[in-house]
Image (cartoon, rainbow, N blue to C red):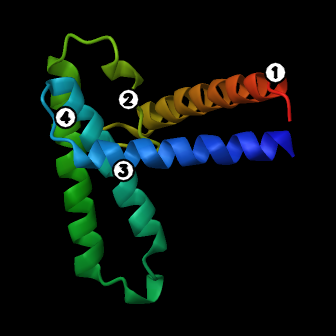
Amino acid sequence: MIYERAGRHEYDRDQALRQMLSLERATSLEGAAMQIAEAISSFALIWDQFPEKSETYQIRQDCRRLNRLLFSALSVMQSQSASQLLPFIVVPKGSPWNLPEEDVERHREFEVALKARRTTITSVSKEVPA
């Protein structure tokens, strides 16, 4: 029960942060990169909800085009930033500009980071009384 509650609180925090991120105008290269990464993730979530029966060739082509544009802009921002935070901006969907092997490695890194985050949440929730 405690773990479920902690998980729900973490989900609520994530959703609140995602909403806040969309309500602020980026003022730095790092901020813009974070917003583009969020746009990529949001786009993937929206696309997953789109009914397959409604997909046309043109819609799939437009989605691939939008994906390429977003990943291209994010890549430039990551390469131009001096910040140490940008390497940690990981989107779960693979970049159309990467080789498949690179995406597999990035996905592994994403899974490790996600597992570490969940472990932290679990260990903190064990310390909090019910």
Above or below: residue 97 compared with residue 63: above
CA gap between label 2 and label 1 equals 29 Å
Of the residues under marks 1 and 4, which one precedes in the sequence? 4
For badge 4, the amino acid type reads: Ala
Disc 2 target residue = 89
Q: Quadrant of residue 109?
A: top right
Q: Between disc 2 and disc 4, whose residue precedes?
A: 4
Which of pointers 3 and 1 lies earlier in the amino acid sequence? 3
80 to 33, vertically: above or below: above
| Residue ID for mark 3 | 19
| Residue 73 in view, yes or no | yes
The residue that disc 4 covers is 32
* Distance from the alpha carbon under mark 3 to that under mark 2: 17 Å
Q: Residue at x 64, y 43 (%)?
A: 9
Distance between the alpha carbons at the discs numbered 1 and 4 = 36 Å
The residue beneath circle 1 is 127
Q: Crowding near pointer 4: few (<14 within 10 Å), some, many (20+)?
A: some
Please state the horizontal and vertical placement of residue 60, each as a whole percent of the image: 30, 72
The local crowd at label 2, few if under 14, some if 14 to 19, many if 20 or more residues have their Cα within 10 Å, is some
Helix, strand or loop at disc 3? helix
From this view, report whether residue 16 is shown above or below residue 79. Answer: below
- Rendered residue at 63%/27% (across/down): 117
Q: Quarter-wise, where is residue 113 in the image?
A: top right
Dots 3, 4 in contact, CB < 8 A: no
Which residue, as the protein is rendered here, is positioned at the far bottom?
53
What SS does tag 1 mark?
helix
Mark-to-mark CA distance, 3 and 1: 29 Å
